[in-house]
Image (tube, rainbow, N blue to C red):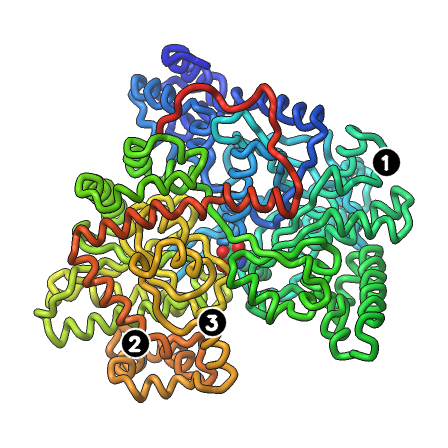
Amino acid sequence: MLTKQQCKEAFQKRLLALAGVSLDEATLYNKYTALASLVRDQIGQRWVDTSCRYSTQKQKQVYYFSVEFLLGRLLDNNLRNLGLRDVWVEALAELGIDYTELADAEHDAGLGNGGLGRLAACFLDSLASLGLPGHGCGIRYTYGLFKQAIVDGIQMEKPDTWLKDLNIWEYRKTNKAVFVQFGSPLGAVKAVPYDIPVIGYDNNTVNTLRLWSAEVRDELIANYSSMTPDDFRKLLEYKSWVEAISQILYPDDRYEEGRHLRLVQEYFLVSAGVQSIIRHIKSKQGDDLSSLSDQVALHINDTHPSLVIPELMRILMDEEGMGWEQAWEITTNTVSYTNHTVLPEALEKWPISQFQSLLPRIYEIVNEINERFCAELWQRYPGDWDRIAAMAVIADGYVKMAHLAVAGSHSVNGVAQLHSTILQTDLLKLFYQHTPYKFNNKTNGVTHRRWLLAANPGLAGLITDTIGPDWLHRPASLEKLLPYAGDAGFQQKLAAVRQYRKQALAKFILHKDQISLDPQSIFDVHVKRIHAYKRQLLNALRIMELYNRLKDNPQLAILPRTFIFAGKAAPGYFLAKKIIQLITTLAKVINHDQSIQNKLKVVFIENYGVTLAEQIIPATDISEQISTAGKEASGTGNMKFMMNGAITVGTLDGANVEIRDAVGDDNIAIFGLNAEQVTVCYQTGQCNPLTAYNQDERIRRCVNQLIDGSLPVLGDEFKPLYDYLMHTNGAFLELQDFAAYLDAQEKIDRLFRDDAGRWQVAAVNIARSGCFSSDRTISQYAADIWHIRPSTGPAARSKKKTRA
Ligand code: 26W
């Protein structure tokens, strides 16, 4: 390890070498790159040692296939996990450089839409930090998720050019390229891997995230000179086709439209990944693949990579010469699948004709899988055509990806207890009846290293000072905080930490949006993708209701509140964009209304992503988790807030149920219909919104205000929101849950008047958050699904004492 002095010298040398500039001339980005590349120097040996260890110990390894990895920034994480952060912060300070400013220059790797992609990133961190042999397999999109700008209150999308500068963390491996075969006109496409090291916390483990990039085969570019104009045009056309494969991430986290390029992307990822894994296994362990399932586990993150199943079948049969039965046995024993959503419009299916022309051989195999699967069902349920049709992999003109994923894997899991139950009793009920042993639950988690240690160093320091550093490696140890929950001294420190972060966030918003927030007010936060089922609209309506009350009675005794929203809407999602516009309109009205004496403020912070979340979450008092019960598979933001001591206002949905179980009813504000009641409501038609509208004057007033000219917008801007809410199908039951939501907010208002009570709640939330670390989740996947073990050896964790 370098001394401070050596760091300083190395840094200046690297600036010269990389950017050709002196310290004085260097931009922040130059400085970031210099430091990052010095950190990179420290990785190589550990990386080689780790894979060597896995090989010599003949470790079974897991490959986590995902079309999204929402990594965020890596410098701070890597420095910290390598134990190099302190010395660098000091060395840079002596050079007159503020480390935080430098770290801020890094692009945020946004190769994901939301929960599913961020979960994949948390899992990689936990795999490495637990010393588990597990790697990611994804796509190196040239453009990540669009950047969101709010212009005149409306969302605009701008391209995310995260690769426009050198990406220090990736290693291009030209020699490990493979070819992916499509039907015409694409033919064979070259897939080039870029490897990103995934560094474990304080344990010398470095795993790999391999991202694939599509390129034109070299031989096609050979001789422009001898080409006819027509051939040249065709070549250019072909080239742009190929390059499009890894160009963009689809900016939709819900609606599956059957877009052609998406299927191309999915097969590209899967084929490149499986080919390179097989090649690796054969090079290490010889040509016999009969015990493949003891050597590797392939996990598919939702159905997007489910072509892993037919692709592995293809390789085992066509290239390795196995028969169907053996190949099928190996494939199903190797593959496992996680479902992340129950919303029907998000279930992937591909029109047969499209699938077949793009992937002729893969289609043949899927067809055979389907026929054999249906024959097996026929044996088991003779004559039950309806059941068989409902379970078939190919039916009604479509290939159904979830059915393929269940039929071709040995494990199917949901991401929270309630969600797993819904899979078994509803969405995948017939499959559960057929093969109950495949089904299990793995409640999501988040890495406490990024979301608590790194995002909230003040709180992390307080925790370590109070209970010691054990929680960093064993998050369950956070429970040791419980005895301090009622301790006045501890509570005071907790309050100070929060206050500091609220001031920082207020400063950030003032700087960015020229809106001044009162850090003494309650920060009430709703940040996540904008979607009807997540009910940002319900939150907006209750803000309108509170504002109405305050207008009616300016003396109304309420604690001042700041409502903070952030989140992206899919570019084509009209209603979600309207919801953003409603929120920004409320902000305009409320923030400028002198008569309410600054008691309420509303802000919509643009461009929500990992980096912004790291700023917002530690500054949050109230975490809004208010989806219609039964619709949010798990949620993971809910866990990040809890871990930072925010109190949850939430429905009994997803992992909120388990958060409630962990903290107890006194430490969370639960409201609204539960999942069963929601189902009944939809089934019986009791969900007619007119009932709530007619019964409750407060609701009627707010809903009417959307269309009666109360809001400063031209024409019928918010008529679509009104129509949506009043739709006879009951939308997502916003109006049915409205009154209960207001009550829950009242309860919170009362709680926040009692300082001791309020900080006790915060402390209990932190103390009980250990089980929502992704270390717990990953340990369960490792033991129950993948059957992998931590690698032991000389590279065990360092002896030095760790401090937060
Ligand atoms: C465009 C097709 C499509 C459909 C679904 C793209 C992406 C999806 C994902 C499955 C949606 C998603 O991100 N689901 C979220 O997964 C998180 C991690 O398990 C959960 O915490 C969230 O509740 C769930 O909405």
Residue lying at the far front in this picture: please name it: 483
Residue displayed at 40% across by 52% down: 608
Q: Is residue 681 above or below residue 405?
A: below
Task: Specify whether tag 2 is near ligand 1 (CB below 8 Å).
Answer: no
Residue type at mark 1 is: Asp
Answer with left or right where residue 731 lies relative to residue 57. Answer: left
SS at badge 2? helix
The label number, if any, that marks residue 774 in the structure image: none
Q: Position of residue 171 (x, y in %)?
A: 61, 30
Answer with left or right where residue 274 lies relative to residue 797. Answer: right
User: Can see residue 499?
Assistant: no
Q: Which residue is mark 3?
A: 675
Q: Is residue 740 above or below residue 777?
A: below
The label number, if any, that marks residue 739 in the structure image: 2
Nearer to the camera, 725 or 130: 130
Q: Quadrant of ligand 1?
A: bottom right
Nearer to the camera, 787 or 141: 787
Q: Is residue 626 above or below residue 244?
A: below
Q: Locate the C terminus by quadrant.
A: top left
Real-space Cα distance between discs 3 and 1?
A: 49 Å
Residue type at mark 2 is: Ala
The label number, if any, that marks residue 288 in the structure image: 1
